[in-house]
Image: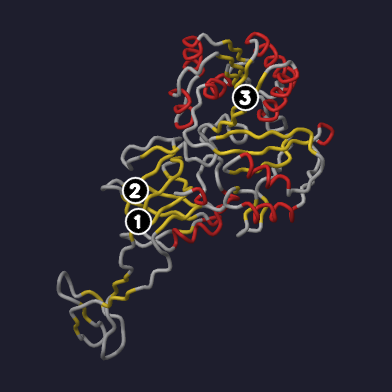
Amino acid sequence: MLLGIDDTDSPSGMCTTYLGALLARRLIKMHMTVREARLLRLNPNVIYKTRGNAAICLDVSGDIDRVFETACELVFELAHFSDENTNPGVVVVENSPGPEFYWKAVRDFCTIKEAVTVLEGAGARYKGFKNGRGLIGATAAVCSVLPDRTFEYLTYRCGNAFGTARFVDRKSLFEAEASTFPHTWDTVDVENNTVVCVPHTPDPVLFGIRGESPSWVALARMQVNSEPSGVEQIFVTNQGTDAHLIEGDTGALTEGRSYRVSCTVCSHAITGRGGHVSIDLDGGGRGIRCMAYEPTKGFRNVLRALWPGDRVSVTGSYKGGSINLEKICILSLAEARTIRPPLCPTCNARMTSAGYEKGYKCRNCGARQKDPEVTLHDRTIRPGWYEVPPVARRHLAKPLCRGP
């Protein structure tokens, strides 16, 4: 059977993945078999998410009624019900209802009513606590399919350490990254000298290692020195797969979805307040703005190096009328040149236009010249893919070390 759980945490603590890891152990102690534990990231633009919008799916063999009762009991025991935005959902179904609801939850928005319709049609056992919003993620979890899959080794703190400062040796994290990259990624951000895999929130997670196989994430984990862990679990995930992206057209983008769009650059980048960089693109006569925010650090320089006429493919979430960039592929570079009125050969002053198709005229001496001054610029960028740094990467965004 497939067991789905979602929305048990809050900003003040708890973590649905932690509850899933504990539940797997409780079921095993009850002489059931847990064949696989999945961590599914859903649409990153959902406003109700606590942190990373994750849901859990356990593939279990055993008595379906005992599994459902045990899951509900553990949720009732550990979920942060005191938070008004914590609304857990538990789903148990003998067979997956099909992938359609999963893909919609990853790329679009779903309602509780839609989830219940899927569950009723599949003959599922389910329970929505409080307003039942967690049924959406729990249903998506049991509907999940992973044509591309990655893994995360999550270590959790001992219960008496929750809410206190974490200890994870920084040097060991950089060494683990150096010895296992590109088979693992986002443990640290080497360019920005920043640890990525250790959260700063009061949840139970100590650190997490992401990678391409259980053996690689386990190898990296073995190299990390830290405070004692309470529970450790390897999850199969859709992280780092670009599962959230839709092939888009600049004339038909919908708020809160994530796209891959091909466009032509039609302006130079502008750096605004706070260091955020914007640039205007054109897709067949339909304009779109792209943003690289300050947390993307050096990635912003890619936008600053673009010129009008460059052809690019961009990926990211469409929010507030802009695509918030995750990656950009420069398909082709235009000739970078600036055109200005020429300098007067007599008095060295900058000429002005003499009128339409009449060339240029010097205001000082009246000299005339037909052609403008054209300056060609060397390009500081080359065609290819560029991505935001690990410190700014979303869970679902595929890192270039896995391919474009």
Give the Cα distance between marks 2 and 1. 9 Å
Residue 75 x, y percent position in the rendering: 69, 19
> Mark 3 or mark 1, which is nearer to you?
3
Q: Residues within 10 Å of mark 1 (few under 14, many from 20)?
A: some
Name the quadrant containing residue 18: top right
Residue 139 vertical placement versus 281 (above, below): above
* Tags 3 and 1 touching, CB below 8 Å: no
> Mark 2 or mark 3, which is nearer to you?
3
Give the Cα distance between marks 2 and 3. 41 Å
Residue annotated with mark 2: 262
Residue 385 vertical placement versus 28 (above, below): below
Q: Earlier in the sequence, mark 2 or mark 3?
A: 3
Q: Is residue 398 left or right of residue 349?
A: right
Residue 303 x, y percent position in the rendering: 44, 58
Amino acid residing under circle 3? Arg
Amino acid residing under circle 1? Leu
Residue 381 x, y percent position in the rendering: 42, 65
Residue annotated with mark 3: 35
Is there any visible trace of residue 80 in the rendered image? no
* Tags 2 and 1 touching, CB below 8 Å: yes
Mark 2 element type? strand
Residue 320 vertical placement versus 53 (above, below): below
Residue annotated with mark 1: 331
